[in-house]
Amino acid sequence: MAGAGDTHHEGVVGAGYPAGAGWVVAAHGELDQDTLAPLEQALAAAADRHRVVVLDAGSVTFGDSSFLNLLLRVHHLTALRIAAPGEQLRRLFALTGADTVLSLYPSVEDAVGGS
């Protein structure tokens, strides 16, 4: 029986789509160890098939250390570009130093263009 508590797992990953030489994966909502599996699957599949993967993080409202760990792992598999991270994610990246490792862009268009 699906209850209201189950719905937070749905909608974490939107439909992926091709963009330029890469693939865009859109993420939504809160990303932590309990909700991360669909995003992990989508990013791994994209990394297997595409040289450049853009994570559209514009609708991500929260990311924890498990989310950050996933991004760092994917970063080692492909050219991962993080597009439109919100204030919470920018703070997470800055506090951990991940902003010096990950490629951050203000928009999906900028990330796709690599500018």
Image (spheres, grey):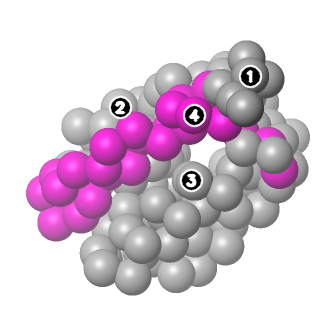
Q: Earlier in the sequence, mark 1 or mark 2?
A: 1
**Callout 3: helix, strand or loop?**
helix
Residue at the spot x=77%, y=62% of the render? 69
Report the residue marked by disc 2.
Answer: 107
Contact check, label 1 and label 4, Cβ < 8 Å: no
**How far apart are labels 1 and 4 at the CA level?**
12 Å
Specify which label sits upstream in the sequence, 4 or 3.
Answer: 4
What residue appears at the point 81 percent right and 46 percent down from the top-left corner?
34
Query: How many neighbours does mark 1 have within 10 angstroms: few (below 14), some (14-19), or many (20 or more)?
Result: few
N-terminal label among 1 and 4: 1
Q: Quadrant of the N terminus?
A: top right
| Residues packed near mark 4 inside 10 Å, few (<14), some (14 to 19) or many (20 plus) | few
Tell me which numbered mark, 2 or 4, is placed earlier along the sequence.
4
Q: Which residues are magenta?
A: 9-33
How dense is the environment of label 3, judged by Cα within 10 Å: few (below 14), some, or many (20 and up)?
many
Residue under numbered circle 3: 39
Query: What number of labels is visible?
Result: 4
Left or right of 108? Residue 27 is right
**Which residue is labeled 4 in the image?**
10
Looking at the rendering, which quadrant does residue 114 occupy?
bottom left
Q: What amino acid is found at the position of numbered circle 2 in the picture? A: Ser
Is residue 7 shown above or below 9?
A: above
Q: At which x and y percent is residue 92?
A: 79, 37
Rendered image quadrant of residue 29: top right
Q: Position of residue 104 (x, y in %)?
A: 51, 45
Amino acid at dot 3: Leu
- Residue under label 1, please give it: 3
- Disc 1 element: loop
Q: Secondary structure at mark 2?
A: loop
Residue 95 in view, yes or no: yes
Give the mark, 3 or 1, whose residue is nearer the N terminus: 1
